[in-house]
Amino acid sequence: MKLIVDGLAVNFELIGKGKCVVLLHGWGDNLSTFSALMSSLRQRYTLIALDLPGFGSTQPPKQIWDLDNYADFLADFLLKLGVKRPYAVIGHSNGGALAVRALATGKIKADKLILIAASGIRDKKGAKRLAVKTVAKIGKATTLWLPTAKRQQLRRKLYGTIGSDLLAVPGLEETFKRTVRQDLQADAAKLDLPVLLIFASNDPAIPLSDGQRYHELIKHSYFEVLDANDHFIHQDQPDKTKDLIEGFL
Amino acid sequence: MNKLKVGVVFGSRSTEHDVSIVTAIASIIKPLQLSGEYEPVPIYIDKSGRWYSDPKLKDISLYSSGQISDFLARQKPIQLSLGGGLKIIKPGLKPKAIKLDVVFPATHGTHGEDGELMGLFELADVPYVGCDMPSSVLAMDKALAKIVTSSQNIPTPEFVWFYAADFAADTQAVVKRVAKLHYPLFVKPVHLGSSIGITKVSQKKDLINAIEVAAHYDNKVIVEEAVANLIEVTVPIIGNDKPVAAYVEQPLLNGDDVFDFDTKYMRGGKGKGSKQTGAQGYSTIPANIDRDLYHRSEQLALDVYAELGCTGIARIDLLIDAKTKSVYFNEVNPLPGSLYAHNWRKAGKSGVQLVSELVELALARHEQNRHKTTVFDTNYLKQY
């Protein structure tokens, strides 16, 4: 289904019956990431999953956005659908970071929050961040002589080896940089609703320590660790993820 | 014997840009080459509207690999010369001009299929394949096509059309006009193909959002009643004065009774694991309907083709109420994706035969029009 929000054609799915649950995908992903989860949750809940601007079949933002722009957009999207206060929000990876920011700033309201391998804990001294910066500098200098497509290919490869999403979506590189600069630890501490944290024991993209940090910061949080090596826990272990979510909701 | 030079024009500033590339390369250029009688000249219009021509543009991997932007960066856009036929000129120290004997438009949607290219070819006085400018304009405006055909008593679902600007200026006035229609409704941009921007609306509360979506893509919007107990069929037709139909074909619909972009171009075949891709393998040929309904559908499609003045090729989409056995005109595609070669193949016409016949039809129409008087001497200027 399509809807026009803030001048952008937005692709979304609205299925199921019952209390309203909103699902937010991560960077470079799209709403189909939740397919397995949605097929079981739809029996008891009205599910709204959308392709965030720049991903899937939704148009990209016309300017460079940060998490606040995405949060404003999310609020407008829900308003347009007539959803004043969803019962719950489920966010994976950067979708989790968006949910934290949108709820902490009061742009959206919900009764419950589920964060699956959520990003948003930005440790400036982190080794990965340093690696991204280094590769960015080296990558730029060493690929300047190549044609645009080859340069992009090589840079994509360089970033891929260190697990960065910087070039995952062409055209959104600046938006990505702004988004990952936002540390959400202060926002997490403001959250005053029950939050279920589902993290993987060996997530190659988001360290388990980020989940632990969220757990320390959020008053009413429940921390669940699944024995997994994948960042996409909801796809890798759909049944366990679903059971945890249903139990929490 | 010199081969006829056939300029195949594709791409352009359209939401169906990518579909056009496949139509041009797989369904037109390849069979033209295989025929041995024609020399296809690829003419690619990029998404910003620049025209390019180079033999390498016949290679689909150039586009699928994403190397096209680098390739074009090294190319100079071509120039056109319109006097006494159409010439493309490749700039350089020694500019190279190629005179085209025939043009085969392969664009879908805006800035091409909608009549714009056909107007250019008329001005250049070059034979071209497919519907002429007036019929392309009519066919690509869903509201105009319905107005013209319903004036000739061709049945079509009840509809209302309006400009996007009127909707923006007075939303409630438009909603009031739509109120005479019975739900469920389909809301569509009038000019776009491939089901882009189409929403099925079952309740009044969803109407405005659906119109906003259609108006996001087009300056004109049509709202029409949905046909109950729907069977959708489509009829590919070729010909000038004596058009003939291929098989009446029954496309696969998605759950919302919409034959949408994903169903049409992304999912491929019906069954799981189907190896077919693109606009093939998603339909039943011939349509699974009774003989009377089949023949009435075929005749209605031929009537629409004639009433809109189509020539060369077009595909007519029809809607059938399976209970009442009523057949309705839905819309026309003056340049069907991939020429609907899969259907023609089943009907006994190979891809090579299809493109050869279309080129012959273009030459015949041009020859026929050549005998029409368009200029004559007068004394009008002598009075000044």
Image (cartoon, rainbow, N blue to C red):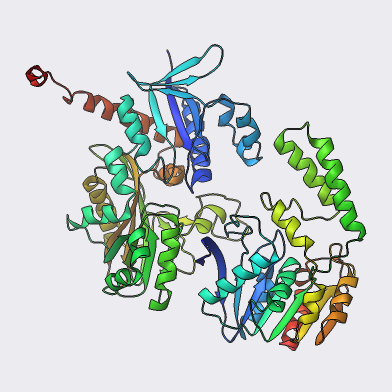
User: What residue do we see at 57% from left, 30% from top?
Assistant: B57
Q: Is residue B311 visible?
A: no
Number of marks in the rendered image = 0
User: What residue do we see at 48% from left, 59% from top?
Assistant: B260
Q: Which of B287 and A64 is in front in this view?
A: A64
Which residue ends up furthest to the front in the rendered image? B384
Classify residue A128 by image quadrant: bottom right
User: What residue do we see at 24% from left, 39% from top?
Assistant: B242
Q: Position of residue B262 (x, y in %)?
A: 53, 57
Q: Which of B179 and A18 is in front in this view?
A: B179
Q: Can residue A28 be seen in this view?
A: yes
Q: Position of residue A214 (x, y in %)?
A: 84, 77
Image quarter in which the N terminus of chain B is found: top left
In the rendered image, the vertical position of residue B275 relative to residue A209, given as above or below: above
Q: Where is residue B218 in the image (x, y as percent from the top left)?
A: 40, 54
In the rendered image, the vertical position of residue B205 relative to residue B18, given as above or below: below
On screen, residue B305 versus residue B20, left or right, reads left
User: What residue do we see at 36% from left, 59% from top?
Assistant: B164
Q: Nearer the viewer, residue B12 or B76?
A: B76
On screen, residue B160 versus residue B270, left or right, reads left
Q: Which of A63 and B338 is in front in this view?
A: A63
Q: Position of residue A92 (x, y in %)?
A: 74, 70
Image quarter in which the C terminus of chain B is found: top left
